[in-house]
Structures are given as structure tokens and as C-alpha cells.
């Protein structure tokens, strides 16, 4: 995958007034820290939004260029306005690509489960991601899971995730991530069945005997 590159500028002043002025200019206040770096910066709002659409994961490594200097960073926190949901602030963490990091990676299912295809079941993702430990430069785009063989009530635990070189799964190995639930019986169907049973005319043994005679 091509490098994800984002341009940034150092901002000398901080505070609410400065932040509002930057946002009116189409810029988003941010901070970059780690490995003896601590800088208040700003990035172009739309450039960062566009970058998030091509990132394979919200925790993908970004090459952040600040006034001509380049840093490998992870997006640690994105704050959004509670009303407009626009990005209001971003935290970037400087990393070394060879250092070990602990990070959440998205789960991605492949195929159609047997229990869904032939028995009307429902594939349920109980977790959307899983925590892994690996080198920062080797973070998987996603953990891909083949669910084709899953039948009704079958499950996939952390311990059954595919092995990936250099990647360790963190968490209880028995944690359930995916299952196939049985078909849902709607309340209307149950009521209809009960009504049919109630309205069915019982056989009168005496009448049948008279007819035979």
C-alpha cells in the first residue's frame, strides 16, 4: 500500500480563540507527541478527512510532514463536535516502525456461512475488532476470517483466529468474536400458528361412527 502522507504546520498560539480561528480557515488543531516530540500543529480539515477514507484502518501509520520534517505517526484520538460531528481536534503519536505497539485491528469476514446460506441463520459479529501486538510497521490492514464452514450456533474465538507472522492476539483466547444465530421466529408467525391450532375443528368420534353405519 502507498504511504499515507499528511501535511501539517506548527501553530505558535493555542487556546479556544485560536482553535476557532483555525477552523474558520478550514484547518484542524492537533498535537503530535512521543519520542521526545511535543508540538502543537494544525492540518487541513478536508485533507485529513480524505485520508481517513483511504486508510485501511483508523490506526494505519501516517507520514506526517511538519514544516519540512517527517514523522511516522498513529492517530491516537479524534475529537468531534457533539452537534455537527465535525472533527475538532486530533492527537498524533510519533512512533518508530520497529517498535512493538498494542493496537486494535478490524475483523473482516469472508465467504457466506453455511448456517446463513442454507438454514436461514444470522451471522453475528460480537466484536468488530481485536487487540494485537506487533511492530508498528507491520500492523495488519484487517484480520480476515473465513466463515464459510460455520453452521447454526457455531462460534469463532480469539484462539481460532488465523496466524499472522509477527502478530500476537491480546485477550482471553476463549472470547467469542463471531457466531451464527438461529433463524428468528417472528411474533406474528407464532400467533398465527396458535390461532390455527385453536380454530382447527376437532374430529368428533361419535359423528364419524354414525356416518360409517
Image: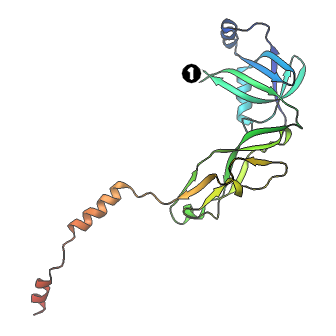
* Residue 159 vertical position relative to residue 171 in the rendered view, above or below: below
Q: Which residue is mark 1?
A: 84
Label 1 SS: loop
Q: Looking at this view, is 158 or 198 the one in front?
A: 158
Picture quadrant of residue 15: top right
Q: Residue at the location (78% across, 55% down)? A: 163
Q: Residue at the location (72% across, 29% down)? A: 50
* Residue 133 vertical position relative to residue 158 in the rendered view, above or below: above
Quadrant of the rendering where the C terminus is positioned: bottom left
Q: Looking at this view, is 46 or 141 the one in front?
A: 141
Picture quadrant of residue 43: top right
Q: How many marks?
A: 1
**Residue 125 x/y as whole percent:** 59, 50
Q: Residue at the location (74% across, 23% down)? A: 91
Report whether residue 56 is seen.
no
Q: Is residue 207 left or right of residue 167?
A: left
**Residue 51 x/y as whole percent:** 74, 30
> In the displayed image of the protein, which residue is found farthest to the bottom?
213
**Residue 31 x/y as whole percent:** 76, 19
Q: Residue at the location (30% across, 64% down)? A: 193
Q: Is residue 196 left or right of residue 133?
A: left
Structural crowding at the residue carrying mark 1, measured as other residues with C-alpha within 10 Å and reported as few (<14), some (14–19) or many (≥20)? few
Quadrant of the rendering where the N terminus is positioned: top right
Q: Looking at this view, is 133 or 187 the one in front?
A: 133
**Residue 72 x/y as whole percent:** 85, 29
Report whether residue 80 is seen.
yes
Amino acid at each position: 500500500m502507498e504511504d499515507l502522507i499528511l501535511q501539517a504546520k506548527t501553530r505558535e498560539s493555542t487556546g479556544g480563540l485560536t482553535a476557532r480561528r483555525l477552523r474558520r480557515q478550514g484547518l484542524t488543531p492537533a498535537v503530535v507527541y512521543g519520542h521526545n516530540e511535543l508540538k502543537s500543529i494544525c492540518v487541513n480539515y478536508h485533507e485529513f478527512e480524505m485520508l481517513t477514507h483511504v486508510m485501511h484502518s483508523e490506526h494505519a501509520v501516517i507520514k506526517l510532514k511538519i514544516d519540512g520534517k517527517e514523522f511516522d505517526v498513529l492517530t491516537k484520538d479524534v475529537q468531534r463536535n457533539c452537534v455537527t460531528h465535525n472533527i475538532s481536534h486530533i492527537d498524533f503519536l510519533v512512533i518508530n516502525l520497529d517498535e512493538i505497539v498494542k493496537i486494535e485491528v478490524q475483523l473482516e469476514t469472508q465467504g457466506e456461512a453455511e448456517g446463513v446460506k442454507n438454514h436461514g441463520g444470522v451471522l453475528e459479529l460480537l466484536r468488530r475488532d481485536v487487540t494485537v501486538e506487533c511492530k508498528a510497521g507491520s500492523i495488519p490492514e484487517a484480520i480476515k476470517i473465513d466463515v464459510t464452514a460455520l453452521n447454526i450456533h457455531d462460534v469463532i474465538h480469539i484462539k481460532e483466529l488465523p496466524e499472522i507472522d509477527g502478530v500476537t492476539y491480546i485477550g482471553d483466547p476463549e472470547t467469542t468474536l463471531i457466531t451464527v444465530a438461529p433463524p428468528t421466529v417472528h411474533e406474528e408467525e407464532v400467533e398465527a400458528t396458535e390461532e390455527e391450532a385453536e380454530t382447527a375443528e376437532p374430529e368428533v368420534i361419535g359423528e364419524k361412527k354414525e356416518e360409517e353405519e
